[in-house]
Image: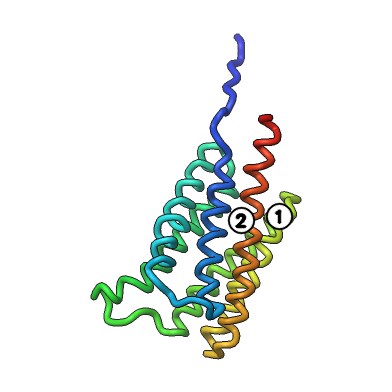
Amino acid sequence: MTDTIIKDTTANPAPLGLLAFGMTTVLLNIHNAGLIPLSSMILAMGIFYGGLAQVIAGIMEWKKGNTFGCTAFTSYGMFWLVFVGLLVLPKMGWWETGPDPKTLGFFLLVWGIFSVVLFVGTLKLKNLPLQVVFGTLVVLFFLLVTAEFTGIATFSVIAGWEGIVCGASAIYAGLSQVLGELDKAA
């Protein structure tokens, strides 16, 4: 009996997920740094690019058999959808108020712990750009947790600047994969 080998010719979904995460993270953290107000532009980016595009990338990673990529992109895509929901749904009358700082602090803490575990996973991958993305993401979440629990606005501003670095590192990681694949194709 002859074994049939099926070659995977589908595109690498990681750049899409990294760019969706990175660009959305940069925009929200430009707001956190105090440079622009929170607006429909940031919220729409959180729903459609940071949210839906990452979930699509996660599903594509699942199809490729990449558990880490599937878990990371799908989870962070859902993070963006939930986060925007926390901000928008109360304004639509679904709840009287949004989360209080303590509640939001615990929400962010859970995501920070999740990010620590994924950061540890990147150490096994030996992929420096991903280690930087997840390492800076861990720092970002814990700065945001500190801001929510203490009420000290300076932590939000510091988180904003650090979040810009985190998002930019994801943009770099995504674009380097796109350009690297172009080099291979040439």
Residue sitting at 53 percent across and 53 percent down? 73
Q: Return the residue at label 2.
A: 171
Residue sitting at 45 percent across and 55 percent down? 49
Q: In which quadrant will I find the N terminus?
A: top right
Marked residue nearer the N-terminal end (1 or 2): 1
| 91 shown above or below 80 | below
| 22 shown above or below 15 | below
| 172 shown above or below 178 | below
**Hey, what amino acid is under mark 1?**
Pro
Q: Return the residue at label 1.
A: 129
Q: Say whether residue 62 is left or right of residue 127.
A: left
**Hey, what amino acid is under mark 2?**
Ile
The image quadrant of residue 140 is: bottom right
Give the structural element (helix, strand or loop) at label 1: helix
Task: Compare residues 84 and 110 and report the one nearer the observer.
Answer: 84
Q: Say whether residue 64 is left or right of residue 181.
A: left
Give how far across and how far down residue 144 sits, in percent.
56, 78
Task: Compare residues 106 and 158 and report the one nearer the observer.
Answer: 158
